[in-house]
Amino acid sequence: MSATALTASQPVRFALIGAGGMGGTHAANLIASPATDLAWVVDLDLERATAWAERSGGRATAEMDEALADPTVDAVLVALPTSVHRLATERAAAAGKHVFCEKPIARTVADAEAMTAACARAGVVFQVGHVVRFYPEYARIKQVLDAGTLGQVAMVRTQRRSAPVMERSPWFADLEKNGGLIIDLMIHDLDTLRWYFGDAERLYAHGLSYTEWQQSRDVAMASVRFRNGVIAHLDASWAHGGFYTAIEVAGEKGLLSHNSRKSATLTFESSENTSEFHNIAPRQTYLRPSTANPPMRELQHFVAAIRTGTPVMTDGAEATRTLALAQAVLDSMRTGRPIAFAQDAAAATVS
């Protein structure tokens, strides 16, 4: 069964599968957007599903197949634990529904490839929710890099820190099924750096994953060398009191810095045209627009692809390559050894 075409005036009718943390965020955006209707909310917690369905004017169910059987549903948004992304995506594709799947695409590359193939066979749009690409600061960094404003980039540092999410949802800590800190949190920065710099060449990682402490707290670092010569140091944590992110990109012509805790959410310090007397570099600041809603922006991107047939930024193949990099980080942590990549970035070997 293939997806049906939509006219420009028709809202895209969604079934939301999973109404928990990110599911609730997506539910609110699906209700708020004039381009979408939230027709079904699917959750094993039927009370939670009903609460969102009452707000949207849609229907609630604990049975995914009930929503997928509705011929008026155009698209499915999957916001479930990682271990069941493949199940939901393949069923949605088989029902002829376009699929937006929260990141990570899956726990294993094999599952990710199967999901991508299923959507291709069904002729449906498949997008994976790597939302950092839709944050204005990170998108602006991409523009600056592509314009060559920084010149040759040498070093990148990222931080992504959060409270221990496993205290409210233990499934996050399950390394075997869901990948823990690396597959869920660090993968945001791994994807962003792949977007900026292309494929990796070699990495080494260390942290609390695969130790006795991992079930209650997790902290990790990774050092990644990209094929274009850029070296990045990534820092991720589920052991902090609050959530924040930061990135520094150092190049021959200056330094780009973002910190979500600062009002000037992106700064550029240039080494060009510095003062002859004071050695103080010109400084440019960037404030996030008050209207920015990154999850809404990625939803709009998905809806536009359904309407126009334009490619999505993070399709199954792109998300699979990011997952392969994250898997390599876990492999390095597990073995305590560096990982070298073959020419095909999806293949990696322990050095």
Image (tube, grey):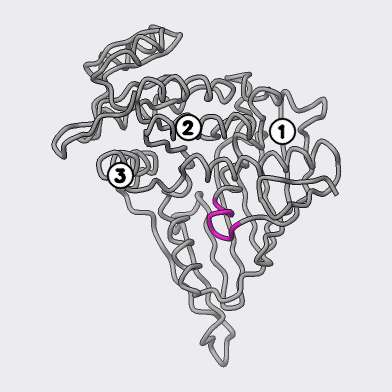
Q: Closer to the observer: label 3 or label 1?
A: 3
Q: Residues within 10 Å of mark 2 (few under 14, many from 20)?
A: many
Q: Secondary structure at mark 2?
A: strand
224 versus 70 height, above or below:
below
Q: Earlier in the sequence, mark 3 or mark 1?
A: 1
Q: Where on the picture, by quarter, is residue 209? A: top right
Asked if residue 196 lies in the magenta stretch, the reply is yes
Residues marked 2 and 1 touching at CB (< 8 Å): no
Amino acid type at mark 1? Asp
Amino acid type at mark 3? Gly
Q: Earlier in the sequence, mark 2 or mark 1?
A: 2
Q: Earlier in the sequence, mark 3 or mark 2?
A: 2
Which residue, as the protein is rendered here, is positioned at the far bottom?
Answer: 276
Q: Secondary structure at mark 1?
A: strand
Tell me what residue is drawn at x 56 percent, y 80 percent: 271
- Part of the protein shown in magenta: 192-198
Considering depth in this image, is 236 or 112 the residue closer to the camera? Answer: 112
Q: Secondary structure at mark 3?
A: loop
The disc placed on residue 218 is: 1
Q: Residues within 10 Å of mark 1 (few under 14, many from 20)?
A: many
Amino acid type at mark 2? Glu
Percent of width and height locating residue 145? 51, 67
Q: CA distance from mark 3 to mark 2?
A: 21 Å
Q: Closer to the observer: label 3 or label 2?
A: 3
Percent of width and height locating residue 324? 65, 42
Asked if residue 228 lies in the magenta stretch, the reply is no
Residue of label 2 = 102
